[in-house]
Image (tube, rainbow, N blue to C red):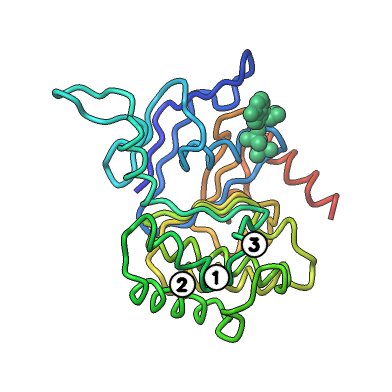
């Protein structure tokens, strides 16, 4: 469903992604772990087309994301292609980024109406269903500022899902939350993983959760995948000394 082939991304002289290869299967949940600065967030940003890549290629469901076909050749994607491809991909960030002047319901209706061209009625039905799914049926008419961090983050999930993406990208979605509301957001991710056919790529510092929920875990080091495997392989029997060292440090910190 998601394929990165030899992807390179540089900021000036600094190579953030260094010939990265990653294949994510349909309905798979992949967690990305690794030290700060290893390129984890950058992968999500290039998938979200918020950043251009300097080399390699990305495809979503077999179709090039960063490129398009012209006269039998692959050329860099134009804005129109990017806009169309972007609707396949949903993202939830560390900070909720909700529209502050809109209610929870309006936040979830905006994209489907403006970008997908749904009628208000269709968009409302879809939004109501999703807000119910994340447990916020009673908060639909509240503005974000009147909601707790956990509730705002659940609205952000409903808003992303309202676009019916094939792929969801989750970037440290619980890092900015108070500890007592982390559980309600993790519960939404569990539900999505179990009940909805959705491909998810999740950057996280929560090793326990990554271990519980992931199909596979990728350990990033200096812009590459140093090791990838099942949660058991990565957390119980890491082979790469860098993975071992990282996990030891994380365990000691906790
Ligand atoms: P991680 O998510 O693993 O902590 P990131 O993908 O956020 O790592 O960033 C990798 C590196 O790229 C960091 O060292 C960061 O300073 C650098 N970086 C990220 N964005 C930019 C930018 N816009 N300009 C310059 N350097 C950047």
- Residue that extends furthest to the right in the rendered view of this protein: 253
The residue to which callout 1 is attached is: 190
- Under circle 1, the secondary element is helix
Identify the residue at horizontal 35%, vertical 55% (top origin): 26
The residue to which callout 2 is attached is: 194
Identify the residue at horizontal 65%, vertical 71% (top origin): 143
- Under circle 2, the secondary element is helix
Separation (CA) of disc 3 from disc 1 = 27 Å
Is residue 6 placed above or below 4 in the rendered structure?
A: above
Is residue 241 placed above or below 193 in the rendered structure?
A: above
Q: Is residue 165 left or right of residue 220?
A: left
Identify the residue at horizontal 66%, vertical 68% (top origin): 144
Pointer 3 and pointer 2: residues touching (CB < 8 Å)? no
Identify the residue at horizontal 43%, vertical 66% (top origin): 162
* Front residue (pair 133, 110): 110
On whether ligand 1 comes within 8 Å of the CB at mark 1, the answer is no
Separation (CA) of disc 3 from disc 2 = 31 Å
Task: Examine the image and state in which quarter residue 70 appears.
Answer: top left
Mark 1: give few (<14), some (14-19) or many (20+) Cα within 10 Å.
some
- Under circle 3, the secondary element is loop
- Residue that extends furthest to the top in the rendered view of this protein: 13
The residue to which callout 3 is attached is: 100
């Amino acid at each position: 469903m998601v394929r990165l082939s030899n992807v390179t991304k540089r900021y000036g002289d600094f190579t953030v992604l260094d010939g990265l290869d990653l294949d994510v299967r349909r309905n798979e949940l992949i967690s990305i772990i690794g030290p700060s600065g290893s390129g984890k967030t950058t992968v999500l940003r290039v998938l979200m087309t918020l950043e251009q890549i300097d080399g390699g290629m990305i495809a979503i469901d077999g179709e090039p994301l960063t490129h398009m076909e012209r006269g039998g050749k692959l050329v860099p994607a134009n804005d129109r292609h990017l806009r169309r491809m972007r609707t396949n991909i949903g993202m939830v960030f560390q900070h909720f980024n909700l529209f502050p002047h809109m209610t929870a319901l309006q936040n979830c209706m905006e994209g489907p109406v403006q970008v997908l061209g749904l009628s208000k009625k269709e968009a409302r039905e879809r939004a109501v269903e999703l807000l119910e799914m994340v447990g916020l049926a009673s908060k639909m008419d509240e503005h974000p500022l009147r909601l707790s961090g956990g509730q705002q983050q659940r609205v952000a999930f409903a808003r992303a899902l309202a676009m019916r993406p094939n792929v969801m990208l989750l970037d440290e979605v619980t890092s900015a939350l108070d500890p007592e509301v982390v559980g309600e957001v993790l519960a939404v991710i569990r539900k999505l993983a179990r009940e909805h056919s959705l491909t998810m790529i999740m950057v996280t510092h929560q090793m326990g959760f990554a271990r519980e929920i992931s199909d596979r875990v990728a350990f990033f080091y200096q812009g590459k995948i140093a090791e990838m495997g099942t949660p058991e392989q990565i957390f119980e029997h890491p082979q790469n000394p860098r993975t071992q060292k990282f996990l030891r440090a994380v365990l000691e910190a906790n």
